[in-house]
Every structure is written in structure tokens, then in C-alpha cells.
Image: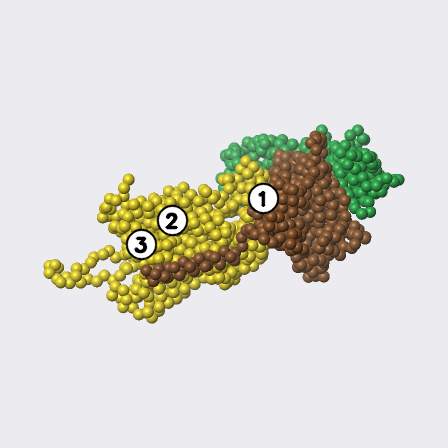
Chain colours: A brown, B green, C yellow
Amino acid sequence: MIRNIGLALLMVVVTCLLLAVGYATSEGVNRSAGTPEGAVRSLYDHVRGRDWRGAMRYVAAASNTDERTFAKDVGGSDGSLRTFSTLQDIRTTVLHENDNDAMVRANTHWSSAVGSLYDTRDLHVIRENGDWKVIWPADKSPTAPPQVMAVNFLRWDIIHRAAGDDWASQDVAAPNARIMNMNALQHDLGNGLQGVMIVGEIENQDTVPAFVSVGATLIGKNGETLGEESSFDKISHTLLPKEVSPFRIDFPGVKLSDVKKVTMQPNALLVPASADPVIAVLHQRIETDARGHKLLKGELVNQSGETVNIPHVIATYYDDSGKPIWVSDGYVDHALEPQIPVPFAVDVRDDVGPNPKFRVTVNQYSIDRQGA
Amino acid sequence: MSAAGGTSRNRYGLAAALTALAMLMAHAAAAQQLRVPDHVVANAGATLTTSGDGSATFYLVGPGTALKREVKLGEAIELSGADLRNAGRYSAILKAGGNAQAASLLVAPAQPAAINFMARPSRVPVAAHDAISGVAFVFDDYKNLVTSPAQVTFNLAVGDAAPITRKVEAREGIAWTRLDSARKAGAAQFVASIGDTNVRRVVQQVASDPCGLRFHTAPAKNGVTVETDPVKDCSGNPVPDGTIVTFVETDGRTRSTVDARIKRGIAQAELPAVPGALITVASGVATGNEVRLGGGK
Amino acid sequence: MTFSSPLPSSSRAVIPLTAILLLALAVHGPLLLMQLPASSYDANTHMFFADHYAHHWFSPWNEKWFGGFSQTTYPPLAHQWVALFSHLLGLTYAYMVVQLIVILLLTVGIFRYAKLWVDERSASYATIAGVLLGSLALLVYQSGQLPNTMATAMALNALPYFYRWSRSSSGSALIKGVAVTLAGAAAHHVTLLFGFALFAWPVFALALIDRDREGKESSVAGVISRAAIFAAICGVLIAVVLLPYFIQTIQHPITQQPIPHGSRDNYLKNFLSGMNFWVIPYGTLILALPFIFTRGTRERRLRPLFFGWWLTAMIGLGGTTPVAPVLLHPGNAFNILTFERFTFWGTIMALPLVGLLAAELIDRYRTRAVVGLWIAAVFSCAMGVAWMTIKPINGSPFRVDQVIAFLNRDDHSKFRYITLGFGNQFDKVSTYANAGSVDGTYNSARLLPELTAYGSAQLYNAKYFGSAGMDSLRAVLKHANQYGLKYIFVRDRFYEPLLAFAGWRPAESYDNGNVTLWTKDDVPPAHKLEFGAAPPPAWQGLMWGILPVGASIFAVFAVLFLPDRRRFVEPLNFPAAATTAPEPVLREAK
């Protein structure tokens, strides 16, 4: 009998061993809180699956926060960019650790509706009832008091020429938008990639709103095209009268010394637009973070009555002669509630000087203001 | 324009070729005679006379027209206005038996009765030199370009201000002019007229860059309110609502900016109240006054 | 209710193949007539390929995806048969009819394959189980893998010929086996590379074991050499029939980043993947696993089948065990392949043993066993079909007619387009729209650097691939002007922020606001893209249009008209009863 089923048993054992090896070596949800790092990773693993209740098991009671507040903080609310994001990856580093508490730096990588987002948080981890738990500071964002805000901002609509009009009757002319200044630079474009970068500013010089985009073509010494790129999202596309937007066009892998000519293609269209919202950029300053990187920080205040879901901060830096030398941008993952300041921070190139001149503009996406 | 001209040339070319062909045929046999009037106006109709006897087939080929009719030789051929509505060269062919005779008929445009008027641009800053152009194409009632000389009057007027008038002789059916924009903003009525016919276009004359931009401050609940005086251009026209006015507050350490929109001629924003901070204002390339909080202007 | 009544003698008889085919027709016919696969993952992709063949039989270059790609990157047989039928039935019904024919061929194949291992009665039970396999239901109705099922059907039908040729050097078996193998290879490349190998080596081992059975006196060397000859002939002919495919593969090897797929998960850690790729496909076959292990290892003749099944099942477990990652490490195959097809093959390999189990259960428990087995088999199939409703792969239905109409009017086809949030309805749009897209569903044919450099599949599903997907979408949108990409149809508002920030504007909406068209006004008309891909030369198009479908037609003729075995005529003395020799047994030649 044993001989008859011996091979079968062997194969069952081999199969079980393979399953065990597979289980031990594959990735999955971390459920360990045996170390400070483990607790942080476990918390974020549950955040990845938007399992707030599961994540709360790794939040220390001392945090004095509840599941709803935690979910709002981590998962976002009001159509903010965080609500359009999923945790992609997390890297943790223990900054210091003793028997009862530790500081863990969590570098998170989020996949969002506008591309990858990176976030760094230094989390205080303490031992609570034998397990490591994360102190998650309760989000104490103020809320605007109930009030009625009269909204009487302008809106531009367009009546285009009708199909039956005679051929000489003209359509409304396109707005007059002009590139005010620009500069071609050789620089690291991020991820260690070298290339040519064209930065500049474009102004809507007209009295009607303009939908602008800027393209550029690099021509080599023999007349060959070295690259053709556009400003993509490094520009505010909708410009109100006299509004100025910075733009940046990247040409990865191209050397400035190979470029003979740059052809710019600004494009402006007349589009229906609204004059709101007004977003104030307060307390702009350049600071150095814990890693030694310079950051341009400030606060955004939505001075209108309707929520701005995704703000996009674009900063232009100038040299002493007023020539633009860098444009950096960043999406803010919190929505702008009316009258509530929301902090922002964008990277600053280290070589722009100790006190560079800069200008910050804010672009925005609001769900309720879109639509066909 | 060039396409229209090309089509017209094609029509004439075709008519000429047919005429030549018909004349060759007519040379071979001249049993019947066809006579056409020297001058025909579009839509006026015409009478063609024939000689000989018997029956024949009459063909008329011209711009946008081709007709065939059985006629009796020796009787007149009546062509209605509708048959000759399009100006240009027509070929009339009379064919009897194996013989054919052809004649060429030139139809001239009728009196000017319509204008196609192109005014550029649709929007122009005030007090700009030669900034507005107008081109008028003169047509008769039947969409024939009137190539004979005709005087076109261009008239540009804003509100109650005295209009600017130019009289221009149309050449080959086209008259054009360039005009300065007025100093006063508003919807300019740009009219091209010929006789009793006129066509109106609207050229929006808009304020130019702000001029003499000034603002003042007032304390507010959460900071300081900054508000411009009515924003006007150098001609005194109010800058359109919606135009961006940027307020910048610097306190030596931080900076705050608001891109305010002009609303009812005034731009207003709220900035943090930081004692000693300097507030400046700008709109486009125009800059205004400065105010130091807690200090003198 | 008692089940102790003796079974009628008919219950121990072989169930005729014709009856099983009628069962297959009864089960799958209505489901296919309901066009259930039309909402599967891949069916629309195969219809897209077929539609191209229907209009351009000899030109495999298709401009509608990826800015232009060659259809020689995918064996064409299934698509070409759908294309041929589409002229009579329309594209969707043509697909369904071809799929139904494939299921019938698969049924025949399972029967013939099972007969190699077990007696005819057990084989008939195995075939019934095959008709009601959960993995087959999933593959047909959820995955829409017509080419895979077609190639598997061919492989199963070719194997008995391979076995007979290897044992008895039957010329007709060689010709038929090679012809059917060729047809299978012309239907699906992954089945050719992996399925044929996994199915063939146990049969080869069986031929070695059976070399001197039934009076045959074959040597080991003879069996090995004949198997080698079979493989060599197949190899050469496949190389000829699929030459354009191999040229394309050599010119443009798959170097793109791995695209995540649930079948590569550890099923023990990912419950949903485990259900989708193992529990539902196996269905009630899971209950037979102890029997498969014990009987498969006990009998010498069944051991090759057991080990073949075991290996295939282990690979089918994807990332659950290290088997697939280790074995398929070369060429990064683990990260390119998906493993639901291995599970499908595994379940088919298990069927002969399941047939044996069924026969034994029926012998022992009679009617109770019959009822239980029927319930188990029907449950497997029902769960496979129902799984699509329990875990639907598509969101709420929506219409794409207006999208297609927009692209086909007013010269809009001068520009390229993509869809976002359309799921597999993109395939339908691209099948019927004249405009081209930079997106596409068949990942292996992609050459655009913005698509291959990121570990994501289709742009229309970009968000499901996380950062890789969104970064790939960003990269494509950045080069919209170069690609003439003017129109983006959005059915998922998730994508709107990116479009708004990148310079697109909403223009029109369709299907009661379900779909919004976003446009970018400064995009010039599309032009031919220069990214390394070029239309195959005309001779390749000619080969592609003739040889694969020719191979399948030849296989049909060979199987139908080439006699299986030489008939011996031996005079018997009359009266026959007087002879002492055993009576000749007259059996229908199979």
C-alpha cells in the first residue's frame, strides 16, 4: 500500500514545498508590526488597498485621530488629486530608533491622474501594547464658516460665424499672445537625464481670454531637426487678458552645442473662459528641507466660493538681468476649499543662487468647471 | 479669390475653344446666318437673328449655362434674362443639317448692387495707426463681379464720435482701405457702401495697456485689502473687465502675490497684513505705484 | 429517494462521440449565439485582426493601431477563417461560428487524446467533462481566446497521429499529424511553443512504453527516431508557413517592459487572482486531485500523463510556486506570457484520469455517481460562465456608434485618436473607424517607444497600470503633434485632469454624456511614422495569405480522405464456426 502511494505522497510533498517557497518569496500585503519599519510598511500596505480600517490598526491611539479623518488625510477628499491617486511604492528608512520610539522616513510614490507623485513623511513610531504603532498627526485643517459668497465674475462666451454667412464675413479673430522672453539652457532634466531646456514666458496681450500652447523645434547645424517638443503641462494654457504664464519645453538627450536654431511655435485660440477662481499665493519663500534640498514654499488661498480640485503651481526663476533661467512645477494633492490656506512646495534647482528672483503662478483644474 | 478667378478663366477658355471649333465648322458651310447683339447686360435678355430657311438646332454655351433649342431659320431667337444671368463670354451655335455657324456673345455685369466686405481685424486696440483694413468686392444682383469702375465709400464710426470716411475707386471690382483705430473704445461700425447698398461690420476697438495704474490699501479682517483706482488706458478708456492686475507684497523674507481680475473697472485683492511690507501692482507690461504697509507711500 | 436500483446496461457503454458533440452544441451553441464572447477581453481584438484580413487578405500591414503594425506578428489562421465567414455572416457571428467549430474540434480532440491513455468508455466520460470544463468556459467567454482554443484543438487531434506514427511508422498518420500540427501552429504561436511541447512529451513517453503493445515490435531507437522525424518535418514546415512571423519576431524581438497580469500573482496571497485563474478554471476537478495523484503515479502507463499534467499545472499556478518563474526565466518569458492557458491545458491533461475516476465511480455507485458527476460537471461550466457576471470585466455598457460616426466623417480620419476608459470597446471602435490610433490591444506588436518603455499595456486602461500606465500616457500625449493625435474620447473622468493640464479641451459629448471628446487644436494631420516598423514586402503578404489557411485546408482533406490504416482482406473458410481460430473482431476504424 505504502509502495503504491509512495510516489503520490512524494509528489504531494514536492507540490506543498513549492507552494510554501512561492508563498515565502512572493510579495504581498505586509501584516507585521514587529518593527517600526514594519508598522509603517503595514500601514501603507493597507493604504494601498484603500483599507482605512486595516491601516488604522497601525495608527497609535495617541494620534488622537479617527478613521474618517485619517481616510480624508491619506485618501483625499473634495475631488483632490489624492482622490485620483493610488500608492504605488514605499521606501522606508529608520532615522533613529530606541526601545519605545523611533522615527521612520517614508518615501512614497503615488500613481495619480497627472502622473507620478512623490511624498516624504517623517513618521514618529511608538511602542503601544507591545506593538509598534505610527503616530499620525490628526489633520486639523480649518473649515470656512458657512456664508454666502456673491459670485459675479466675468465669463466669456463666443459666437462663431454662422455657416450661412457670406464668405467675406469674418470669424472673431484669434487672441494676440506673445512670447515675452525665453532662454535655452543645457541642464539635467530630472532622473539624471541631460538635455536642452527652453524656458520663457508668454503673455496674453489681448482683451479676451486665450488658450495658449508653445511648441519648439531644435534645428541642428546641418539643418536637421534635433527635436520637436511642446510645453505640455508646464504652462497655464488658459490665459486671461494680460495674464502671463511661464513655459518650459524639455528636449531630453540633446546637446545645446549641437543646436543652431530654435523655432518657436506659439499658438493661441479664442476660447470660452471664466475669470474665476482667484488663487492668492501667500508667504512665498525659499527654504532648505531636511535632506538639504531647496524648496519654494508658500500657501495657496482660493479667494473664490467654489472648490478648486487640483491646483498646479508653476514657478519661474530669473537671473539678475530678469532672464528666466528655470521653471519648476508641482501639483498640490489637496483641494483648495474657499478661504482655506493650503501649503505647497516645489523643487528649486540648487544652482539658481541663494536668493533667486522668482514668480509663482497657479493653474487649476476644477471638476465642475469642465465639461463639453 | 484666386480660385474664383481660375474658374472664370476656365469658363472663358472653354467658351473660346467651342467658338473656335464652331467657326471652323461654319467656315465649311455658310448656308445659314446667325447675328448676335454687340452689347448684352446680365439678366437683360437678348435677341439673336437668323437667316435662311428650314429648321436648325441652336446651342448656347456660357458661364454656368448650356442650352439647346430647335429654331426656325429666318426667325429671331429670344434669349431670356435667366438664360444670360452670368456675366462672361457665351458661344452661340446654329446647326442645320451638316452645317453649323457660331458667334460669340459677351455679357457684361449689371449695375453694382451688392458688396462682400472683409474687415480685419475683428478686435483692435484704440489709437493704433493703420490698424484696420477693409476690402470690398463689388457685385451686381446676380453675383457677377462688377469690373467697371465704381466708387466705394468706407465709413468707420464709434459711438457719437465723428466718423472717418474714405471714398475709394474700385478697380476690377475690388476696393480697399486702411484706417487708424479711434481713440475711443467701443464697437466701431465699419461700413462699406456703394449707391444704396451698404454692408456693416463691427470692429471692436478695445482699450490699450493700462496707464497710470494706482492702488490704495485698507485694513481688512484677515489682512489688508488692496484696491486699484479705476484702471484706464492712456486714452482714458476703461480697461476691460477680467484683465489681470497682479499685486505683489514683499516683506524681505516672504512674498505674496494675487492675480486679481478687474471687475467693474477696479481690481481688488486681499493680502496678509505684514508691517513694513512693500506692495506693488502691475498689469501686463504696465506697473503702478508702491505702498509700504505701516510706512509712507 | 434511493439510488440503489441497478443501472441499465447502457450506462456502462461507451457514450458515442456524436452524442457528446451534440451535447457540446447544446451547451455552447446558445451561449455563442448570444454573442457572449463579444464582451470578453480579447474577442474584439481577434475580430479586429479578422476585419483587416476580410478587407486586405494579402496585406498584413495595418495602419489602425500603434501608428501602423504588421499582423504577421500573430499567426493568422483563426482570424482568416473568421474573415472568410464574415463575408457571409458578418464579423461577430463569423467569430461565434468559428469558435463553435473549434469547440466541436476540441471535443473530438479530447476524445481521441483521452483514448490514448484510458479505455474508450472512460475517454467518453472525459470528453463530456471536457465539454463542461470551467477553464474552457473562461477561455471562450471571459478571455475570448479563439486562437488558443483552436490551436489546442489541433494539438489534441494531432497527438494520436504522432503516437501512431512513432509506434508503427504509419505514413498516413505522419501526413495527418504533420498537417494538423501545421494548422495548429498557424493558429497560435504560444500554443505552438509551449502547448505542443507540454502535450507531446507525455505522448512520446507513452509511445515508448507502448512500443511493443498489440503485437507491434518497435524498438526504443525506432520510436525516438520517428518522433524526431515528426518534429523535424513539423519544424521545417512551420518555419516555412510562419516565415513572415519569424522574420518579424527576429527583426523586432519583444524588448518591452513587463506588463503586470493577475495570472502571475501568488494565488494564495491574491484571492481574486486565485479564484479567477485556478479555482474557477479547475472547478470541481479540484475534487479529483487526490485521485489524479494516486492513480496517475501508480500505473506505469499513466505516469507520463500525470507528470505532464503536474508540470503544466505547476506552470499554470503562475507566481504561486517558483516553477514558472524559474522555467520561464530565459528570455523573460515569465513576464511576457499569461498563465490562464497553461491552466486550461492542465485541466485537459487531467481529463483522462477524471474519465477513469468517473467510470470507477459509476461502476461502484451507479445512478448516484451519474447524478453527482453530472452536477459536478455542470457546476464547473456554470461557474465558468457565471464568473463573468460575478466579477464582470467591463463597466456599464455604452454605445460607441457615435464615436465611430465622428471619426468617419468630415475628414476626421486624417488625425489619430485614442480612447480612455473604453476597455475592450476600443477594439470595436478601431475595427469600424477609418482613423488610426497610437493605441492598440495586441501588446507584442507595439514598437512606439512611448508604449514599450513602460510596463503598461493599452493606453485606454492606463490607470490600471499605475505610474507606468499614466507615465506612458503622458509620454504619448507629449508627442501628440508628432503623431497627429488630435482626438481623445474619454469615458472615465479620471483622465480629465491630465488632458486639461496638457492642453486638450472638451469639444463634444456622446451617449448622453457618457463619452466626451477632447481635442487639441494645434495638432497637424497624421503622417506616416518613422519608428523602425515597415510594411512587410509583398511576397510575405502573399505567403501569409496562402500558406496558413492552405495548411488548414490540406489538414481537413488529409484527415477526411487519407485512409487511416491499410485494410487486410483475408478469406475465411465457410462455415466459419468450424474453424478453431478466434473469430475476427470487426471494429470500425477510428
* Amino acid type of the residue that numbered disc 2 sits on in the rendered structure: Thr
- Classify 10 Å Cα crowding around label 1: few (below 14), some (14-19), many (20 and above): many
Residue occupied by mark 1? A52
Looking at this view, is C224 or C92 the one in front?
A: C224
What mark, if any, has residue B191 been given in the picture?
A: none
Looking at this view, is C476 or C548 the one in front?
A: C476
- Classify 10 Å Cα crowding around label 3: few (below 14), some (14-19), many (20 and above): many
Q: CA distance from mark 1 to mark 2?
A: 36 Å
**Secondary structure under badge 2?**
helix
Question: Which of the two discs, 1 and 3, sits closer to the camera?
Answer: 1
* Amino acid type of the residue that numbered disc 3 sits on in the rendered structure: Leu
Task: Residue at 78% x, 39% y: name it.
Answer: B271
**Secondary structure under badge 1?**
helix
Q: CA distance from mark 2 to mark 3?
A: 15 Å
Q: Mark 2 — on which chain does it sit?
A: C
- Residue C511: image x %, image y %? 53, 37
Q: Is residue A99 visible?
A: yes
**Secondary structure under badge 3?**
helix
- Classify 10 Å Cα crowding around label 2: few (below 14), some (14-19), many (20 and above): many
Task: Residue at 63% x, 31% y: name it.
Answer: B44
Q: Are marks 1 and 3 on the same chain?
A: no
Q: Mark 3 — on which chain does it sit?
A: C
Residue occupied by mark 3? C356
Residue occupied by mark 2? C284
Task: Residue at 45% x, 44% y: name it.
Answer: C388
Quick one: label 2 or label 3, which is nearer the N terminus?
Answer: 2
Quadrant of the snapshot with the N terminus of chain A: bottom left
* Amino acid type of the residue that numbered disc 1 sits on in the rendered structure: Trp
- Residue A346: image x %, image y %? 71, 49
Q: Mark 1 — on which chain does it sit?
A: A
